[in-house]
Amino acid sequence: MGFLMDLYILKIGGSACTEKAKNVCEAKTGVIRQIAREIKAAQAEKEFKLILVHGAGPFGHKLVSDYGINNGVRTGRQVEGFVRTHNSMLALNKIFLDIFSEEGLNAVSIPPLACIVQSGKKIRRFDYSLVKKLLGVSIIPVLHGDMVFDDRLGASVVSGDAIIPFLAKKLGAKKVFFGTDVAGVFTADPKRHPGAKLIKEIHPRNIGVILRKVSGPSAVDVTGGMKGKLLEMKSILRGIDAFVFDATKNGNVLNLLLGKPVTGTKITF
Ligand code: IPE
């Protein structure tokens, strides 16, 4: 049975799991617990494999920006920033793992620093053998945005948004879900523009127009906000369905995992 089970990859973006808008290092533990419970409930109804990737919010973006380490890590102070950012991501990751364990989920962390090397901010090498091993015994691998070594820049940020298409392609994911704190991709930032419209589908024929419309990040975000996510997906995510949705809304994660309808943006490249 094992290898026939569908594989889903779920990203919980920094906007959904941290106080990103306030730019303070606080996790939204209520949202994380809700998501954990919904994964558990979905597991009780059907068999599937799941990889979870969480974002950073201020736990990563604030430090990267404060230490000026988005374009290379060379000086002693930048090395300090690299270490502090990685450790800060581990702290957020620990919050996820503790809650997952309390809710009865079998999940194990894989820090990207230990298995990814980049070159010019792009993933160059990725030893994902542990991801495969964990999936083989139905343990949820949990990865996250991180600082990793970079052949050209010393070190650089790897976004969860880059990890996901890579793994989706290598492991043949059935679907990838990008959870944020709004109901999908909008024509403008829906928090600042109440008239912003939800874009229900993004495909090769409308992506050009949409990329011109969708804005960059509104809060501190060194990996480019929604626009960065779309560009990342466009470059790698061919043939795999992606769905952007509101992960803070009760029932959404459960319904997605069970294949039931959820409001959001469907992306096919
Ligand atoms: C960013 O990860 C990681 C660091 C800044 C160290 P993500 O790009 O996945 O984080 P979010 O979802 O935008 O917060």
Image (cartoon, rainbow, N blue to C red):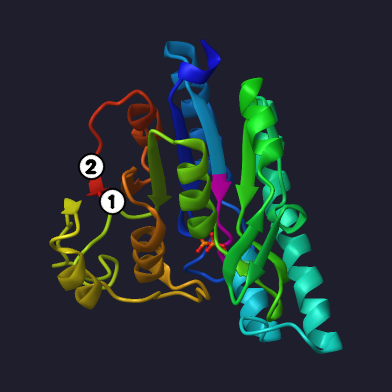
Q: Position of residue 22 (x, y in %)?
A: 51, 70
30 in the magenta segment = no
Hey, what amino acid is under mark 2?
Thr
Left or right, 207 with reference to 101: left
The residue where tag 1 is placed is 183
Q: Are marks 2 and 1 in contact (CB under 8 Å)?
A: yes
Q: Position of residue 190 (x, y in %)?
A: 25, 65
Q: Which residues are magenta?
A: 53-57
Hey, what amino acid is under mark 1?
Ala
- Tell me the SS state at disc 2: loop
The residue where tag 2 is placed is 263
Location of residue 125 (image quadrant) = bottom right
The residue depicted at 55 percent of the width and 37 percent of the height is 51
The residue depicted at 46 percent of the width and 27 percent of the height is 38
54 in the magenta segment = yes
Q: Few, some or many C-alpha atoms within 10 Å of disc 2 (few <14, some 14-19, many ≥20)? A: some
